[in-house]
Image (spheres, helix red, strand yellow):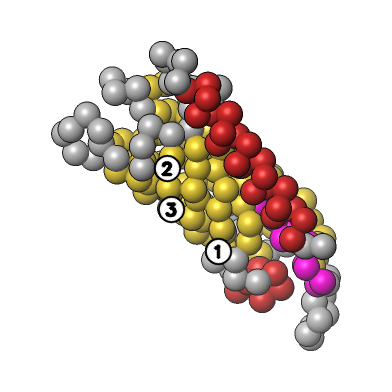
Amino acid sequence: MRKTPAAWIAAIFLAVLTCSQAVAQYEEQPSKIGVKIGMFRPSSENLRAGGGSLWKSLGIEYVLAFDETSKPMTYIALDRTSKDEYALTASVMPITYNRVWRSGTSSSKPFYFGAGVGVSFLDIKEYPVHPPFVPADEKKISFAVNGVLGYEFNESFFGELRYTKAGKAADIDFSGLTFYLGLRNLF
């Protein structure tokens, strides 16, 4: 039953991939929408102990400005990471404004790095199975910052390593490292 969401995510990703390639052949201007799927590793031992060391993450980007080579330079990102286990239900959803800089002097410039600022929506319900058995239940909005290293495989596909400092809820830090694979030039 837990494989059903992963199957749906994979099916949607493949459908978007197919549609984007068909639409991209007729476009002159780059698309402003991108999607990404990845794995998140929480920094907090409490989150790793209750929910495992790797969590699924999804994201969407909306490009605000392109550089001279038609690659994204500034964008708004919405990422959603969550875990639902026996003793822990938690989610973090940062919305950030991001700025990217590219390395190299060629027109392709596949490597990039960047930073972003914004807010995180944090939600945790924890029912500890070990002493001191103190449950946690809190929703909070927190300041968020991130740093990103990325590589563009071509004009559509990219990979990113992103560290997000998302803040705390119920005295538990929601910061962590995410590896994303993504697709730009959707519509």
Tag 1 near tag 2, CB within 8 Å: no
In the rendered structure, the answer to whether residue 46 lies left or right of residue 131 reads left
Circle 2 residue: 158
Q: In which quarter of the image is residue 51?
A: bottom right
On the rendered image, what quadrant is the N terminus found in? bottom right
CA distance for labels 1 and 2: 19 Å
Residue that badge 3 annotates:
161
Q: Where is residue 123 in the image (x, y as percent from the top left)?
A: 75, 53
Q: Height in image: 74 above or below 39?
A: above
Rendered location of residue 173, percent (x, y): 61, 62
Query: Hey, what amino acid is under mark 1?
Result: Arg
Labelled pair 3, 2 in contact (Cβ < 8 Å): no
Instruction: Return the residue at label 1.
Output: 41
Query: On screen, 67 above or below 9?
Result: above
**What residue type is disc 2 on?**
Phe
Q: How far apart are marks 3 and 1 (CA)?
A: 11 Å
Say which quarter of the image contains residue 133: bottom right
In magenta segment, residue 128: no
